Structure formats: structure tokens, C-alpha cells
């Protein structure tokens, strides 16, 4: 099989998020929480032509996911897609011409079937997405405190799984965050921990899964090496040093790899 869907993470973390899902009919931008200048610069580093973006999808309305959208839209005439709750959550979002979807709807974008599913975050109506063609699949889920039945169903068995692995539970508990923020992050409408993500991999990873990308790592309460090691243990993978010096893990047969997206450097998964 020649993969037809590719993931390009331009930024992932609490300071700004943006990812591109490349399909057979163009590019889909998932969230736009960094400046247009940074977006174009990082896309250029990955060889992406952002003029091929046909659709922008928003997962939710937090500023680290939508802060760059208004300026981006000054140079974009494609389709904007999100839930009604997200579109109405901020004044500048409600002024944009969104196509509104329900949190379990399916639609077409860039030659892919996109299936939304509800996530669990302290916002109006957040969603994740499953992207598929006849012979390829990708699951995308960040900013959720837990994975419900629908999320688990949509994310199961995808070839590329982009899944939040925000914090190490012990680092969060012993860290500098005030008590209320620790409670929010660790709660059911906060962020998935490394341990939660690792437990989920037990049911999500199948023989069809080739790459797990850990998303939205906390710079305060996580480390790529800690994250990779925790996820690797759940699927029988072994930590290795990647070609770029970043922590990775692979199974003995080389069929599954684990890596981390980051705040400050872009990443492509083919």
C-alpha cells in the first residue's frame, strides 16, 4: 500500500498548535494557534505549499488553537469547519463564515472522509477527527481529559495516531502549578497524561498502526524521553535515539514507531 494520508505537525503545545493533514486532494489545516508567519515558515521547512489548503478545521476555541486564525483567513478563501459551540465561543470566531458540524458528523475534505467525534475539555463543544481514504487512515485527538467510547472507536486501528500525551502524573503533582491548575489539567475535562495515553494504546494500536505521535506535551510537566518511554512500554517498543537526536521508540519488527510532536520544531509523518 502506498500511503495516501500524511501528517505534518507545525506546532504542538500550550503556546500554540497547528497541524496539516495531507490528503490526495490537498491539505487540511487542523487548528491555527500560531502566527501566519510562523505557520508559513514551518510549513516551508517541511516542503508544504500552504496554498494547497482547502479546509481549516478547529478542534476548540482556546487561544493556543485559534489565535492565528483571523490573520490566516485574510489570505484564505477555502472552507472553515467547526462545531456551533466553538464558532460562537469567541466574538472574532462568530464573525467568520464557518460551516457548522455536529460533534459526530462526517464530511469530505481534500479527498478524505473526515469523521468528527466528541472530546472532553473545558470548552463549548470540542472535537477530534478521523481521516480516511479507501486505503489509509489517520486519527487526531488532543486536549481531552478522557477518551469516550466514540473517540476510542474512531481512533482504533488508524495507520497514524496523533494522540495527546500531555503530562507525567508525578511531575504534575510535584511541580510548580498551583493546586487549582493541577486539578484542572489532571481532571476529566483537562489533558491526557502519559499514563492515560499509554493505557489507551492497548486498545487503539492494531497491526495496521505504524506510527504513534504524542501530542501537546507540557513543557513544564513532561519530557519527550519520559513520554516516549511510557508509551513504548504499553506496546512492547524499545526507546531509541532518532536520526535527529530526538527520543523515539520502535517495536522489534520495526512495524510500529513512537515519536513526539513539539512546540518549536515541525514534524512530518509519512
Image (spheres, helix red, strand yellow):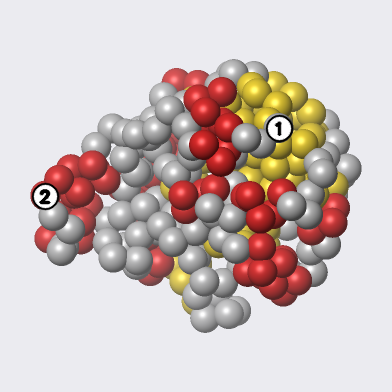
The residue located at (85%, 47%) in the rendering is 26
The quadrant holding residue 13 is bottom left
In the picture provided, is 39 more to the left or to the right than 166? right
* x, y percent for residue 151: 50, 27
The quadrant holding residue 168 is bottom left
Q: Is any atom of residue 212 visible in this view? A: no
Q: Which residue in the protein does label 2 denote?
A: 179
In the picture provided, is 215 more to the left or to the right than 107? left
In the picture provided, is 141 more to the left or to the right than 139? left
In terms of sequence position, does the residue under pointer 1 or pointer 2 come before the other? 1
In the picture provided, is 234 more to the left or to the right than 92? left
* x, y percent for residue 212: 54, 51
Who is closer to the viewer here, 174 or 29?
A: 29
Please report contact status of discs 1 and 2: CB closer than 8 Å, yes or no.
no
User: Which residue reaches farthest right?
Assistant: 25
The residue located at (81%, 41%) in the rendering is 78
Amino acid at each position: 500500500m502506498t500511503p495516501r494520508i500524511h501528517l505534518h505537525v507545525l506546532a504542538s503545545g500550550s503556546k500554540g498548535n497547528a497541524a496539516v493533514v495531507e490528503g490526495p486532494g490537498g491539505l487540511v489545516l487542523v487548528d491555527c494557534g500560531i502566527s501566519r508567519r510562523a505557520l508559513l515558515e514551518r510549513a516551508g521547512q517541511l516542503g508544504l505549499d500552504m496554498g494547497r489548503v482547502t479546509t481549516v478545521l478547529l478542534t476548540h476555541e482556546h487561544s493556543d488553537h485559534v489565535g492565528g486564525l483571523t490573520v490566516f483567513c485574510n489570505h484564505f478563501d477555502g472552507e472553515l469547519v467547526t462545531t456551533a459551540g466553538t464558532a460562537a465561543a469567541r466574538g472574532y470566531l462568530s464573525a467568520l463564515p464557518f460551516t457548522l458540524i455536529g460533534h459526530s458528523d462526517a464530511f469530505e475534505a481534500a479527498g478524505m472522509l473526515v469523521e468528527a467525534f466528541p472530546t472532553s475539555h473545558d470548552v463549548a463543544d470540542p472535537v477530534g477527527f478521523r481521516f480516511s481514504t479507501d486505503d489509509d487512515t489517520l486519527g487526531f485527538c488532543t486536549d481531552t481529559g478522557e477518551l469516550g467510547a466514540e473517540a476510542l472507536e474512531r481512533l482504533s486501528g488508524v495507520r497514524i495516531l496523533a494522540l495527546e500525551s500531555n503530562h507525567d502524573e508525578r511531575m504534575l503533582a510535584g511541580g510548580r502549578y498551583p493546586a487549582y491548575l493541577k486539578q484542572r489539567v489532571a481532571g476529566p475535562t483537562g489533558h491526557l497524561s502519559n499514563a492515560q495515553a499509554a493505557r489507551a494504546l492497548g486498545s487503539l494500536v492494531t497491526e495496521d498502526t505504524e506510527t504513534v505521535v504524542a501530542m501537546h506535551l507540557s513543557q513544564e510537566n513532561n519530557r519527550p524521553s519520559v513520554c516516549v518511554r511510557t508509551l513504548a512500554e504499553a506496546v512492547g517498543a524499545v526507546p531509541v535515539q532518532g536520526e535527529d537526536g530526538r527520543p523515539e521508540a520502535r517495536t522489534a519488527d520495526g512495524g510500529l514507531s513512537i515519536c513526539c510532536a513539539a512546540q518549536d520544531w515541525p514534524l512530518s509523518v509519512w
